[in-house]
Image: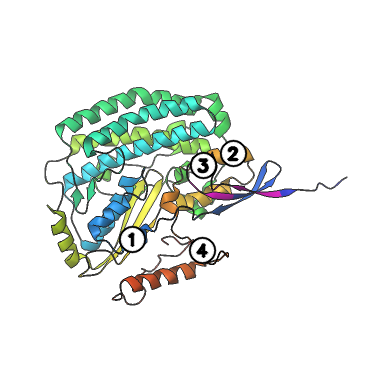
């Protein structure tokens, strides 16, 4: 018998590629058309937001937070604000918590419809793109009517929300719910029962539950692999428990046990569209009267935080892509954070899908990456250039340099300003 000789070749995929929505690079090792391994390269979209924040007060940082990502602008702002509220011990009015739920779920609908369309486009099924993005216009119109903007809503403030849900907004929301109750069955039928989509997505980029846990997969990526986890549910976040929140699993939508493939990740998003409509409806029914923020003016808030902001806080929220974590450290007498770090869902999900692609075909790459709905504006934190030569920094190097720069900006900081556990496991909050 003649021994088979394998010819492996490495090819770059990205950072600029027509199948990628944002700059990210993957080094694919191929045996013919079969993927042997995927090496993820990040750092093409660093904007230095954390660095800028150390020169801003707590209110100004809110505007940075919501510009980390256009699609998850409310999620980032919400999580940052929760971290500051925990640090300062600020109690949020109950009505404000219900309004936060409504805006957060509107953003989830917006994000999931966008991603469903992108996946349809990436498999060459542009009818699906036009169907979902037409439906997406309705939720963006509602967001604009409530907040004044289709993205970057500036709805959050530390201690509550900036704008109330008025009677005219309730009518728009109920009209939107009725619209989606008529439109979503068609979108669901296409994604779950169309033979073209099922053939393309079933058994593609499978991430078994064990691998998803090992890699720290979150959001629809983790739930698509059978991990029953949702920060809104597990953290009993705000008033979500009163609204009947629970993780949406593939079996809730398809009736079949999770396989961890691209099809299941899309099924979770379909299920969450229905759940978000239900949560908004319940929030409108149960929302009490009362104040919408703890502090009447921003200058009063900043002055209070100079007194209360002595300690640290961690905010968690289930963004559309998965669990989002923000860490804030403050110091009494300062009007802004000494340290601000975040861990976005795309970070673990990118490395998860890279492992899931092993053994798949080259043609699966674009769709598999799209199935985690990656956001590189969220993910990129470090870029190093030194005399045009390659420089490799370890996790300890990154943490050491981060601490050094923090002390340069804030000389009063003593010791290690990073809490125990932060900066471990693949640079969680670096």
Q: Nearer the viewer, mark 3 or mark 4?
A: 4
Q: CA distance from mark 3 to mark 2?
A: 13 Å
What is the number of the mark on residue 20? 3
Q: CA distance from mark 1 to mark 3?
A: 28 Å
What is the number of the mark on residue 218? none
| Structural crowding at the residue carrying mark 1, measured as other residues with C-alpha within 10 Å and reported as few (<14), some (14–19) or many (≥20) | few
Residue 401 visible here:
yes
Q: Which is nearer the N-term, disc 4 or disc 1? A: 1
Q: CA distance from mark 3 to mark 4?
A: 24 Å
Q: CA distance from mark 4 to mark 1?
A: 19 Å
Question: What residue would you read off at disc 1?
Answer: 52
Q: Nearer the viewer, mark 3 or mark 2?
A: 3
Q: Which is nearer the N-term, disc 1 or disc 2? A: 1
Q: Which is nearer the N-term, disc 1 or disc 3? A: 3
Image quarter hosting the C terminus: bottom left
Q: Which is nearer the N-term, disc 3 or disc 4? A: 3
Q: Which residues are magenta?
A: 9-26
C-beta proximity under 8 Å, tags 3 and 4: no
Q: CA distance from mark 4 to mark 2?
A: 33 Å
Q: Nearer the viewer, mark 1 or mark 2?
A: 1
Q: Secondary structure at mark 2?
A: helix
Front position in the image: 317 or 55: 55
Q: Is residue 428 above or below residue 165?
A: below
Name the magenta segment's main secondary structure.
loop
């Amino acid at each position: 018998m003649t021994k088979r000789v394998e010819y492996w070749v490495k090819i770059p995929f990205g950072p600029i590629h027509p199948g990628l929505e944002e700059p990210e690079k993957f080094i694919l090792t191929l045996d013919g058309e079969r993927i042997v391994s995927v090496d993820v390269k990040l750092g093409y979209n660093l904007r230095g937001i954390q660095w800028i924040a150390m020169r801003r007060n707590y209110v100004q940082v809110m505007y940075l937070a919501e510009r980390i990502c256009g699609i998850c602008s409310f999620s980032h702002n919400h999580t940052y604000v929760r971290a500051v509220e925990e640090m300062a011990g600020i109690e949020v009015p109950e009505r404000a918590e219900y309004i936060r739920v409504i805006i957060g779920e509107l953003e989830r609908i917006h994000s999931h419809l966008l991603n469903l369309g992108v996946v349809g486009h990436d498999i060459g099924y542009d009818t699906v793109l036009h169907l979902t993005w037409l439906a997406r216009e309705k939720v963006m119109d509602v967001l604009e009517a409530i907040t004044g903007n289709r993205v970057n809503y500036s709805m959050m403030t530390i201690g509550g929300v900036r704008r109330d849900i008025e009677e005219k907004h309730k009518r728009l929301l109920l009209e939107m719910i009725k619209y989606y109750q008529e439109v979503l069955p068609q979108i669901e039928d296409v994604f779950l029962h169309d033979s073209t989509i099922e053939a393309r997505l079933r058994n593609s980029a499978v991430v078994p539950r064990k691998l998803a846990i090992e890699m720290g997969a979150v959001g629809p990526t983790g739930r698509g692999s059978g991990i029953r986890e949702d920060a809104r549910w597990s953290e009993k976040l705000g008033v979500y428990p009163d609204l009947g929140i629970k993780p949406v699993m593939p079996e809730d939508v398809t009736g079949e046990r999770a396989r961890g493939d691209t099809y299941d990740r899309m099924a979770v998003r379909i299920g969450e569209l229905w759940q978000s409509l239900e949560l908004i409806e319940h929030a409108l029914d149960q929302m009490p009267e009362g104040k919408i923020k703890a502090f009447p003016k921003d200058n009063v808030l900043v002055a209070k935080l100079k007194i209360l902001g002595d300690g640290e806080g961690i905010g968690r929220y289930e963004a559309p892509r998965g669990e989002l974590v923000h860490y804030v450290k403050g110091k009494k007498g300062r009007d802004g954070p000494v340290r601000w770090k975040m861990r976005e869902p795309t970070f673990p999900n990118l490395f998860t899908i890279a492992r899931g692609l092993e053994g798949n075909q080259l043609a699966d790459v674009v769709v598999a990456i799209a199935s985690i709905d990656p956001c590189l504006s969220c993910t990129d934190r470090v870029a190093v250039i030194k005399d045009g030569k390659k420089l490799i920094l370890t996790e300890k190097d990154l943490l050491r340099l981060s601490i050094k720069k923090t002390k340069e900006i804030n000389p009063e900081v003593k010791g290690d300003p990073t809490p125990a556990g932060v900066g471990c496991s693949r640079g969680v909050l670096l």
